[in-house]
């Protein structure tokens, strides 16, 4: 019998139809993947299942009975647990406190010891190695996600909805996460797995529903399909899965890092005498396990983090004394940060304003200290078109754009400034296939035009696709530099784990 | 030279001067832990002082006065709660508005009710009450255990608030709401209700602090008698890192500065007294400057919470 039936649900926001007559049947004790590009309506659907939105038409059947929900609390009481893409955890509280939060209320003491014991047992039964007394901020992302799952299980959820669960995980964490889904399935939990990553779907899902533009385009058994077929259904056209690298002759050294030393936010050394060279017309990829100094490297180059020692030379000039603005204007450094929502954009500003964040104080964006709104509108319309940003209006706050479209806004702004050097971090994280293709093509165009691109990413397959040389970071150093053809998984694994290499 | 007797005297006085600041600051801890800045503490204290005078004036009982004081303070808290939580008025602006309204309204009502010669009429109040046994301990006893009843209330309040914040279900809700209201909401915590309650509690405690000044210290109501103690309480909250026990100690530090300045004032009549009265305020500025960048308020304090749900 079907555990859940999503029975012909339609949902509109204004004139925009986010879900159009969606019908999905989900079997009990199965892993059911919902696959689609950003903006296909997956998240809207999940928010309806979780009681956050009310559908305009249609209903949800749980065990054959229609479900009436007006809040997440109702969903929880029906055994539906949601693991959001951005974790709903209070970082300053312990694991136990987070799990217990909301279960009891009022002026009564909480028996934390008893809860802690039960949580420890529950974690053990599903194979999670978690210390309930740890404060959440001390845990790596993969652990935090397990805390979210424990929260749902502790509330006796038998349906788990996971929204893009792997997008926040380090590559090394994904494998064990997928295994834990299988453990949960073995315990007869029904799992709804929202994603746009084909390989993960192929790896764990029993059944796959593909969505596009708010409609279900296909529903198949995972065993009876191929990644290529799914990708086609998702984007509605053929995707070039392995891009052909564009050849270009590297020019002179345009960015040179010499023995960079810097500390992270906690005061721990994050860059440890790191050196590299980047040439014009070259894409230098930097990869490694998350948290080995990649973010700090991108920040010291952009000018957001002070160097303790070392030099950064851009076209032969030491840019150490320059601030962010002068690095952009005088050294030609463009920056696409890792945290696009907080560092890259002002979320509550309109898209058009976000486009001129870097050039607001000069012509043509402003004149004599006054903004030129006509220019801003013209500029926005032009960039939206050229960079294929999907939105309702350029006056819309950028907050309401999907992740891929937010990334396009940042890329457009940074590339239109005609940089000589582009530092781009986690460019494809959380993006769908179509957006990734767009980003990669954009980088190839930049490279062909002689821009040096420093491409920092933990997503190995993207780095391999795009980089001319690949540096691997481990504990603040580059442990080795490889050409793509040398980059076997064995060799990369060694470097990522810090096994020293001969100088290339 | 401070000899032991003078030190004992300063400490005893410091404790009494600490009380209004401590009540207000402890309430502020609860409020800010839930995510609402209570800049209106000063006005709520003043309302509490006025309420205490009014209640005592009408009934002749300081206990009734304290009750009215707490009620008026809590009413101020409720106004802040409605403005900032319901109507999404900026918390700081709403707090300042409450301070200004309280200042004007209490002065006006005081003249109306107590008359122009209000300051000459002394109200009934509390006197020191030595706890048998404990007050006999040498040196420490007279300082801590020969005080008026509201000081003992404070002694009991601190461990209770510690329990409330760290051991009770409501405390867990408070801490979660102040750090990440979105997460608390998705876990089923009634974010708005928690914040509302905490703001009202904060107002009530600030009112109690104000009431103390009237019924235990000066026994009259005068215009703007809170005299910036509410703002010192705000500093004590930061110095106390949003923790009840530490905030009590921070309040005591400010009380001690105040007691010290009084002592210095009497000992040095030739120096202009304004230099000494400024001491607690200077101390609060120095304490905050010293802590700058090293203490972090609850992450969501000051930010209005709005559910992102669109229906």
Image (cartoon, coloured by chain):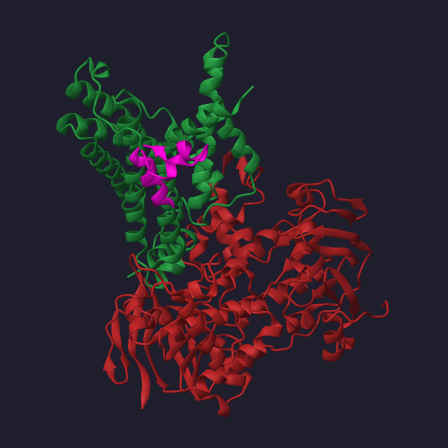
Give percent across and percent down for residue B292.
55, 38
**Who's the residue at 31% across and 39% down the image?**
B205
Quadrant of the image containing the C terminus of chain B: bottom left
Query: In the displayed structure, does residue A427 sit left or right of residue A450?
Result: left
Query: In the displayed structure, does residue A265 sit left or right of residue B214?
Result: right
Q: Nearer the viewer, residue B19 or B29?
A: B19
**Who's the residue at 71% across and 51% down the image?**
A262
Q: Nearer the viewer, residue A11 or B128?
A: B128
- Figure quadrant of residue A238: bottom right
Considering the whole magenta stretch, tell me its main secondary structure: helix
Does residue B131 show up magenta in the picture? yes
Vertical placement of B206 versus B191: above or below? Answer: above
**Residue occupying the far top of the picture:** B270
Quadrant of the image containing the N terminus of chain B: top right
Q: Nearer the viewer, residue B116 or B58?
A: B58
Residue B90 appears in view:
no
Vertical placement of B105 versus A304: above or below? Answer: above
Chain whose colour in the figure is green:
B
Q: Nearer the viewer, residue A140 or A285?
A: A140
- Figure quadrant of residue A78: bottom left
**Who's the residue at 67% across and 49% down the image?**
A302
Chain whose colour in the figure is red:
A
Give percent across and percent down for residue A497.
72, 71
Does residue A151 show up magenta in the picture? no
Give percent across and percent down for residue A222.
48, 88
Query: In the displayed structure, does residue A25 sit left or right of residue A173?
Result: left
Residue A196 appears in view:
yes
Vertical placement of A436 versus A231: above or below? Answer: above
**Who's the residue at 35% across and 77% down the image?**
A156
- Residue range corresponding to the magenta coloring: B130-158
Give percent across and percent down for residue A245.
70, 72
- Figure quadrant of residue A386: bottom right
């Amino acid at each position: 019998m079907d555990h859940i039936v999503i029975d012909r649900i339609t949902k509109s926001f204004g004139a925009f139809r986010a879900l159009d007559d969606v019908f999905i049947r989900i079997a009990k004790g199965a892993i059911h993947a919902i696959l689609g590009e950003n903006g296909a309506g997956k998240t809207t659907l999940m928010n309806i299942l979780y009681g956050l939105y009310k559908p305009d038409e249609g209903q949800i059947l749980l065990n054959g009975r229609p479900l009436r929900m007006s809040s997440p609390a109702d969903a929880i009481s029906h055994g539906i647990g949601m693991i959001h893409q951005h974790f709903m955890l209070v970082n300053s509280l312990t694991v136990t406190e987070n799990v217990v939060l909301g279960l009891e209320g009022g002026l009564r003491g909480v028996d934390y010891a008893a809860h802690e014991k039960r949580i420890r047992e529950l974690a053990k039964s599903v194979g999670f190695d978690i210390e309930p007394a740890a404060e959440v901020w001390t845990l790596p992302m993969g652990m935090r996600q397990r805390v979210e799952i424990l929260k749902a299980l502790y509330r006796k959820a038998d349906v788990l909805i996971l929204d893009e669960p792997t997008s926040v995980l380090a590559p090394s964490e994904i494998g064990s996460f997928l295994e834990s889904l299988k453990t949960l399935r073995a315990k007869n939990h029904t799992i709804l797995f929202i994603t746009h990553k084909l390989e993960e779907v192929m790896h764990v899902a029993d059944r796959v529903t593909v969505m596009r533009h708010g409609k279900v385009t296909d529903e198949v058994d995972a065993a009876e399909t191929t990644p290529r077929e799914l990708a086609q259904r998702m984007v509605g056209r053929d995707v070039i899965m392995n891009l052909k690298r564009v050849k270009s002759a590297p020019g002179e050294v345009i960015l040179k890092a010499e023995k960079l030393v810097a500390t992270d936010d906690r005061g721990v050394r994050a860059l440890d005498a790191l050196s590299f060279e980047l040439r014009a017309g070259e894409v230098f990829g930097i990869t490694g396990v998350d948290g080995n100094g990649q973010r700090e490297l991108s920040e010291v180059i952009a000018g957001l983090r002070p160097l303790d020692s070392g030099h950064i030379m851009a076209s032969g000039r030491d840019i150490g004394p320059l601030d962010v603005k002068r690095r952009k204007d005088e050294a030609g450094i463009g920056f696409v940060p890792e945290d696009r929502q907080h560092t890259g954009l002002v979320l509550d500003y309109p898209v058009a304003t976000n486009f001129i964040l870097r050039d607001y104080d000069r012509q043509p964006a402003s004149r004599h200290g006054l903004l030129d709104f006509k220019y801003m509108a013209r500029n926005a319309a032009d960039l939206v078109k050229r960079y294929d940003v999907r939105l309702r209006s350029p006056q819309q706050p950028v907050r309401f754009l999907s992740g891929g479209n937010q990334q396009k806004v940042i890329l457009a702004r940074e590339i239109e400034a005609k940089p000589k050097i582009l530092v781009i971090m986690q460019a494809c994280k959380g993006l769908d296939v179509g957006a990734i293709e767009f980003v990669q093509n954009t980088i190839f165009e930049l490279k062909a035009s002689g821009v040096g691109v420093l491409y920092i990413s933990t997503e190995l397959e993207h780095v391999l696709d795009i980089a001319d040389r690949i540096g691997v970071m481990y504990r603040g150093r580059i442990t080795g530099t490889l050409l793509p053809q040398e980059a076997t998984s064995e060799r990369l694994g060694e470097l990522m784990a810090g096994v020293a290499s001969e100088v290339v | 030279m401070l000899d032991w007797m003078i030190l004992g005297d300063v400490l005893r006085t410091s404790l009494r001067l600490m009380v209004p600041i401590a009540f207000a600051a402890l309430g502020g801890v609860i409020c800010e832990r839930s995510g609402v800045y209570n800049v209106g503490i000063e006005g709520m204290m003043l309302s509490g002082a006025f309420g205490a005078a009014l209640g005592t004036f009408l009934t002749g009982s300081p206990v009734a006065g304290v009750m009215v004081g707490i009620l008026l303070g809590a009413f101020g808290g409720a106004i802040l709660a409605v403005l900032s939580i319901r109507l999404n008025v900026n918390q700081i602006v709403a707090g300042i508005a409450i301070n200004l309204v309280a200042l004007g309204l209490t002065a006006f009502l005081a003249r109306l009710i107590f008359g122009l010669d209000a300051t000459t009429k002394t109200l009934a109040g509390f006197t020191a009450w030595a706890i048998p046994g404990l007050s006999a301990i040498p040196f420490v006893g007279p300082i801590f255990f020969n005080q008026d009843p509201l000081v003992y209330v404070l002694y009991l309040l601190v461990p209770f608030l510690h329990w409330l914040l760290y051991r009770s279900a409501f405390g867990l809700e408070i801490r979660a709401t102040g750090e990440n209201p979105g997460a608390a909401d998705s876990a089923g915590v009634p974010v708005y209700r928690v914040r509302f309650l905490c703001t009202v509690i904060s107002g009530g405690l600030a009112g109690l602090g104000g009431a103390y000044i009237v019924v235990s210290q000066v026994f009259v109501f005068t215009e703007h008698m809170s005299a910036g103690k509410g703002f010192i309480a705000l500093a004590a909250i930061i110095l106390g890192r949003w923790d009840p026990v530490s905030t009590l100690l921070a309040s005591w530090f400010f009380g001690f500065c105040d007691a010290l300045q009084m002592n210095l004032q009497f000992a040095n009549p030739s120096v202009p007294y304004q230099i000494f009265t400024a001491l607690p305020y200077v101390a609060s500025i120095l304490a905050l400057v010293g802590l700058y960048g090293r203490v972090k308020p609850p992450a969501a304090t000051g930010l209005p919470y709005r559910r992102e749900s669109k229906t």
